[in-house]
């Protein structure tokens, strides 16, 4: 097992810098998830840790050892990709044992490690099958098994579940959580899936255009985002942002107004000194944080264009007076009526304030 440390890591492909100075510490045994928009550099960073991409500058340490220029095979890592990359002509057992075969390990050791991994992954009855005789989830388990037999210090996963259907993803997500619990090995996991990130991670790293925007525990990022980008990225459906102006400020409370959307005054607590009166800001409200309009400190009104009823919850998409759309969640699936102009209550304690550059105020 091993921790990990990235120091001022950069990667250039030709003229383009795709990783633009990343510093990150991962504790031994930690489960770290990389999230960020497509093309922000998640896979590149993971491949640099694996040694599948060279590092342009900066250093990578695994288990306290500088591995920056080292061969992938010597780094003590194992990587699982979105495409399982199994050998079609080999059985499950041979596929899983292949890395040990390559390392010229004795046959009884290979057999034992393959059996152990198969047990952990519930693959015992499939050991003699070929990959084509397996479901997608079973194939991905074989790919994970092939990583397990090597007993790496760090597991690297690049969107391992994105080829699976919704139900299998849920199952495999739980399997991976259990695997981490059982093995206690450091894992770094790239995903687009909010639920995977929130549920699997000890620590989420939010990347944007080759830089880290924020690192923190899932709930830390959800409850206390540093900027509008992280606030919008963590949480689904995403946070609503309403343009507003600071009317007055005192201590760490800003009174903001948004006359264009009929919002008179909301007093929002800020992290530090609030932006000066007259500053343009935006108010961030998560869909799940609206409250009944009756008795609310402030109200936004909008015309509901679409209602999505998911059973346990419903989402109303409503056009507010400045033409923007907000999303509002309700646990009462029958609360919303499409076409109706509706008032949505705001709880100032659940509202976030961002300055004009998107920094948390
Ligand atoms: N071999 C390469 N040569 C040139 N540019 C590359 C190469 N590999 C990746 N890139 C560029 O680097 C950037 C980051 O790519 P990367 O694959 O790391 O993104 P990602 O965050 O994993 O995206 P996705 O979520 O779509 O998988 C992209 O702009 C991509 O086009
Ligand atoms: Mg990728």
Image (spheres, rainbow, N blue to C red):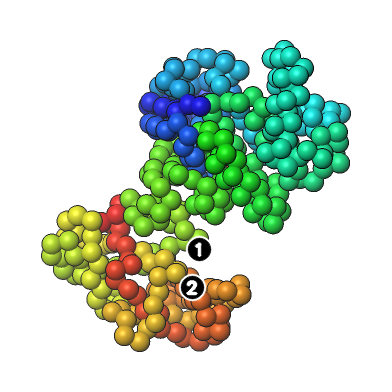
**How many neighbours does mark 1 have within 10 angstroms: few (below 14), some (14-19), or many (20 or more)?**
some
Identify the residue shown where x is 57% and y is 77%. Answer: 307
Identify the residue shown where x is 45% and y is 28%. Answer: 3
Q: Mark 2 points at which residue?
A: 329
CB under 8 Å between discs 2 and 1: yes
- Could you give the CA–CA distance between mark 2 and mark 1, rounded to whole angstroms? 9 Å
Identify the residue shown where x is 66% and y is 52%. Answer: 171
Task: State which quadrant residue 348 falls in.
Answer: bottom left
Decide if residue 251 is in sight here.
yes
Vertical relation: 87 (above or below) 282? above
Is 151 left or right of 122, judged from the image as shown? left
Decide if residue 275 is in sight here.
no
Q: Nearer the viewer, residue 53 or 144?
A: 144
Label 1: state its secondary structure: loop
Task: State which quadrant residue 308 falls in.
Answer: bottom right
- Horizontal and vertical percent for residue 141? 71, 40
Q: Nearer the viewer, residue 249 or 193?
A: 193
Is 243 left or right of 319, judged from the image as shown? left
- Horizontal and vertical percent for residue 187? 53, 35
Label 2: state its secondary structure: strand
Question: Mark 2 vs mark 1: which is more N-terminal?
Answer: 1
- Mark count: 2
- Horizontal and vertical percent for residue 158? 60, 38
Q: Name the residue under label 1.
A: 237
Vertical relation: 323 (above or below) 186? below
């Amino acid at each position: 097992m091993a921790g990990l440390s990235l120091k001022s890591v950069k990667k250039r492909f030709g003229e383009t810098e795709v990783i633009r100075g990343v510093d990150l510490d991962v504790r031994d045994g930690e489960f770290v998830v990389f999230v960020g928009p497509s093309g922000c550099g998640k896979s590149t960073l993971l491949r640099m840790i694996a040694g599948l991409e060279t590092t342009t500058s900066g250093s990578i340490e695994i288990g306290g050892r500088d591995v920056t220029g080292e061969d992938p095979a010597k780094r003590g890592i194992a990587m699982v990709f979105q495409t399982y990359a199994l050998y079609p002509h080999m059985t499950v057992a041979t596929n899983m044992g292949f890395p040990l075969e390559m390392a010229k390990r004795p046959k009884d050791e290979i057999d034992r490690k393959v059996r152990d991994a198969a047990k952990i992954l519930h693959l015992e009855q499939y050991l003699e099958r070929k990959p084509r005789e397996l479901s997608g989830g079973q194939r991905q388990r074989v790919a994970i098994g092939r990583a397990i037999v090597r007993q790496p210090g760090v597991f690297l996963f690049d969107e391992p579940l994105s080829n699976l259907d919704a139900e299998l993803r849920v199952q495999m997500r739980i399997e991976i959580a259990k695997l981490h619990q059982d093995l206690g090995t450091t894992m770094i996991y790239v995903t687009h899936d909010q639920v995977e990130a929130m549920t699997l991670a000890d620590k989420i790293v939010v990347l944007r255009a080759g830089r880290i925007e924020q690192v923190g525990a899932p709930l830390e990022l959800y409850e206390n985002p540093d900027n509008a980008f992280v606030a919008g990225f963590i949480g689904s459906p995403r946070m609503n942002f309403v343009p507003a102006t600071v009317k007055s400020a005192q201590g760490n409370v800003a009174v903001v107004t948004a006359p264009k959307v009929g919002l008179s005054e909301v007093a929002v607590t800020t992290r530090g000194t609030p932006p000066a009166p007259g500053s343009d800001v935006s108010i961030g409200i998560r869909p799940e944080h609206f409250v009944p309009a009756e008795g609310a400190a402030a109200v936004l009104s909008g015309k509901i264009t679409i209602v999505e009823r998911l059973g346990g919850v419903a989402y109303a998409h409503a056009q507010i007076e400045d033409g923007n759309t907000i999303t509002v969640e309700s646990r009462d699936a029958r609360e919303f009526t499409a076409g109706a102009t509706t008032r949505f209550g705001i709880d100032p304690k659940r509202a976030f304030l961002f300055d004009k550059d998107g920094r948390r105020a």
